[in-house]
Image (cartoon, helix red, strand yellow):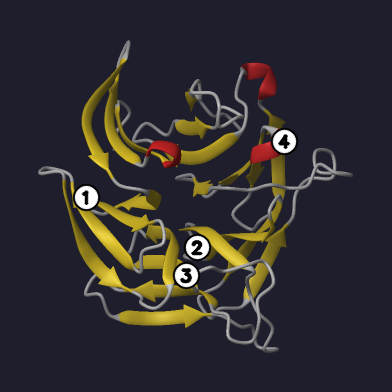
């Protein structure tokens, strides 16, 4: 929410916490809910997609109250993002989606206005080919393009850049210097900076890929030597710092870290 305050969710304990970070981490609020993705609204409330729920929920940050906000039933919302123009963009899929979509499967991006009315949706390209396998995270850039993390398999993914006509402008499937052989590109989250750079994490390879607004690779940094391993979630604070939420590497461990990174590129 700013450079000292964050909402952070933990899948394994089904908790959503508001934390303050100064010299220590202080838990301000603890809510029992299983969040899939979340995004800030213009007035600093939080929109949530919840695991296996057909609703988008609104967390009013002043009261800590969570209420249903929007339904996409029978579909399940996955990634969620509020654009600078105050639109809500969602990735959605059918319940129980697998990596092998069939004719009845539905994997698409939907754009809503803040009046909850659907403005646009994208599922197929102009050649009637599916745009996505399982789209899990979404954001927008300074050109108003839509950037989607699309999972192709359990440990492989890509970034897809769509224009507002729903046509694919660019796909990115990793950097050959990092993603070769069995080291598949493993993206889990995506953010854009104020100048239009795109940052995508690479979970199994402990890396961050930095792209231009057009989707060209600028740099790729393996962060393991800085102690940043299994980067799961990304966010940029009000000071332009990158927050990286990590996985501990094992469900038996509870020493996952949250890192704040100063960026220069």
Residue at position x 44%, y 38% in the image: 12
Residue 153 as seen in the image, left or right of residue 255: right
Mark 2 Cα shell of 10 Å, populated few (<14), some (14-19), many (≥20): few
Judged from the image, the secondary structure of the residue bearing numbered disc 2 is loop
Judged from the image, the secondary structure of the residue bearing numbered disc 1 is loop
Looking at the image, which is closer to me, 75 or 232? 75
Label of residue 45 in the image: 1
Whole-percent x, y for residue 43 in the image: 19, 51
| Front position among marks 4 and 2 | 4
Residue 186 visible in image: yes
3D distance between C-alphas at marks 2 and 3 = 23 Å
3D distance between C-alphas at marks 1 and 4 = 33 Å
Judged from the image, the secondary structure of the residue bearing numbered disc 3 is strand
Q: Which residue is mark 2?
A: 143
Looking at the image, which is closer to me, 211 or 243? 243
Label of residue 251 in the image: none
Label of residue 92 in the image: 3
Residue at position x 33%, y 39% in the image: 15
Mark 3 Cα shell of 10 Å, populated few (<14), some (14-19), many (≥20): many
- Name which of mark 2 and mark 1 comes first in the sequence: 1
Residue at position x 37%, y 49% in the image: 35
Check contact, mark 3 vs mark 1: CB within 8 A: no
Q: Which residue is mark 4?
A: 205
Whole-percent x, y for residue 89 in the image: 40, 66
- Name which of mark 3 and mark 4 comes first in the sequence: 3
Place residue 251 in its image quadrant.
Answer: top right
């Amino acid at each position: 929410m700013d450079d000292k305050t964050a909402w952070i969710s933990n899948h394994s304990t089904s908790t959503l916490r508001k934390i303050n970070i100064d010299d220590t981490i202080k838990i301000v609020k603890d809510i029992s809910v299983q969040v899939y993705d979340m995004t800030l609204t213009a007035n600093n409330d939080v929109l949530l997609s919840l695991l296996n729920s057909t609703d988008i929920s609104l967390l009013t940050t002043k009261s800590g109250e969570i209420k249903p906000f929007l339904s996409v039933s029978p579909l399940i919302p996955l990634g969620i993002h509020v654009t600078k123009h105050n639109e809500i963009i969602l990735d959605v899929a059918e319940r129980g989606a697998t990596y092998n979509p069939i004719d009845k499967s539905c994997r698409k991006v939907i754009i809503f206005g803040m009046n909850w009315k659907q403005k646009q949706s994208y599922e197929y390209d102009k050649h009637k080919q599916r745009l996505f396998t399982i789209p899990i995270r979404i954001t927008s850039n300074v050109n108003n393009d839509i950037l989607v993390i699309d999972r192709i398999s359990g440990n492989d993914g890509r970034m897809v850049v769509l224009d507002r006509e729903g046509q694919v402008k660019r796909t990115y499937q990793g950097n050959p210097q990092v993603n070769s052989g069995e080291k598949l590109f493993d993206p889990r989250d995506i953010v854009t900076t104020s100048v239009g750079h795109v940052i995508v994490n690479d979970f199994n390879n402990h890396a961050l890929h930095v792209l231009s607004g057009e989707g060209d690779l600028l740099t790729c940094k393996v962060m393991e030597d800085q102690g940043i391993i299994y980067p799961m979630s990304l966010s940029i604070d009000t000071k332009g710092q990158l927050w990286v939420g990590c996985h501990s590497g094992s469900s038996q461990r509870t020493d996952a870290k949250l890192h704040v990174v100063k960026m220069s590129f």
